[in-house]
Image (cartoon, rainbow, N blue to C red):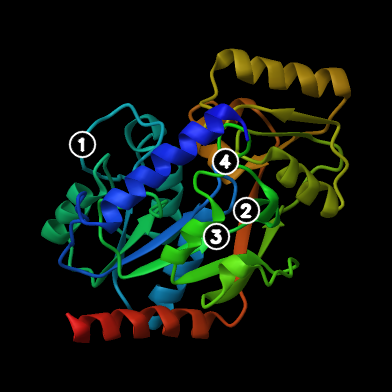
Amino acid sequence: MNPLAAIYRGVTAARNSLFDRGVLRSRRLNRPVVSVGNLSAGGAGKTPFVIALGELLQARGVPFDVLSRGYGRKTRGALIVDPDGSPADFGDEPLLIARRLRVPVIVGESRYEAGKLAEEKFETQLHILDDGFQHRSVARDFDIVLMTAHDFEDRLIPAGRLREPLSALARADAVALPAEFSSNHAALSGKLVWRMRRDIVIPAAPQSPVVFCGIARPAQFFAQVRAAGISPAAEIVFRDHHVYGPNDIQSLIDARRNRSADGFVTTQKDAINLAPNAHLLQPLIVAELRLTLDNPAGVLDAILDRINKRKLRS
């Protein structure tokens, strides 16, 4: 084992043990909390899953809010996301969630303080805790962990991308797997296992565009673009959550000219980080990532039933 990974494993195990033994306390909000998280460092589809779950709740008439850290923002404290705001104030993913769902989204380093603000300001019935699996300082009523096929063979940070070992799935209520991935791994024993599909919609895309993104798993996005019948003239990667400045815009324009490309294609998250420079890249097509769950009614029933049972026991 990589020595740094061994140290990381020890620190993570010690922290979890402190929570398990009650030395570190998980504070409980007044309303139920549904956590959506993963084991790996980014790219499992948490934001699309939160949006898909939110749409299921909306269809069922259940009012909710979303609590998020707001990664990449330059502000501090608990803040209510303005859908017309900037990623510098709220983070790109909270903005995307707020714009897609049009529900209260609250960011905060302390998700507990964000939840208290939500309960003070909004008449919602439950909280969705975005990227919450490792954020154990907030008690949750239902824990969902998203897994990629690679996670089952991966290693801990820094040797791999895993934040926690597979044994951490013992804390999960449900595990969501890619629909095309078949696994009966021992770590899934006794868990609800859900299947999810992720597809992209690219309206009126150019045939040979510059395709670019700043996301956790860019190769996956590029493969989806090619599977949609598009032949990229260039594929350009920026770091995850990258905020595009004038030099980046010029490099993309140069790539289009040098490769004789007929436009640009990017992700919704990148479109948020492009503002206010998006108009300089034309035509710019924003690919929409859609996540669908097998048996979505059953998924929502399982969450609400578990919450109701835990209410009765408390």
How far separated are the C-alphas under marks 3 and 4? Answer: 16 Å
What residue lies at 44% left-to-right and 71% top-to-bottom?
173
Q: Nearer the viewer, residue 282 or 287?
A: 287
Answer above or below: position of 227 versus 299.
above
Q: Nearer the viewer, residue 33 or 227?
A: 33
Local crowd size for mark 4, using a 10 Å CA cut-off: few (<14), some (14–19), many (≥20): many
Q: Which residue is mark 4?
A: 156
Q: Secondary structure at mark 1?
A: loop
Amino acid type at mark 4: Leu
Q: Position of residue 10 (x, y in %)?
A: 44, 39
Answer above or below: position of 260 versus 292.
above
Q: Position of residue 254 (x, y in %)?
A: 76, 16
Answer above or below: position of 282 versus 161.
above
Q: Kindly indicate whether the residue at mark 4 contacts the one at mark 3 (C-beta within 8 angstroms).
A: no
Q: For the residues carrying marks 4 and 1, which lies nearer the camera in this image?
A: 4
* Quadrant in which the C terminus appears: bottom left
Q: Position of residue 291 (x, y in %)?
A: 60, 64
Marking on residue 146: 3
Q: Quadrant of residue 127?
A: bottom left
Q: Kindly indicate whether the residue at mark 2 contacts the one at mark 4 (C-beta within 8 angstroms).
A: no
Amino acid type at mark 3: Leu
Residue 173 vs residue 252: left or right?
Answer: left
How far separated are the C-alphas under marks 3 and 1? Answer: 27 Å
Marking on residue 288: 2
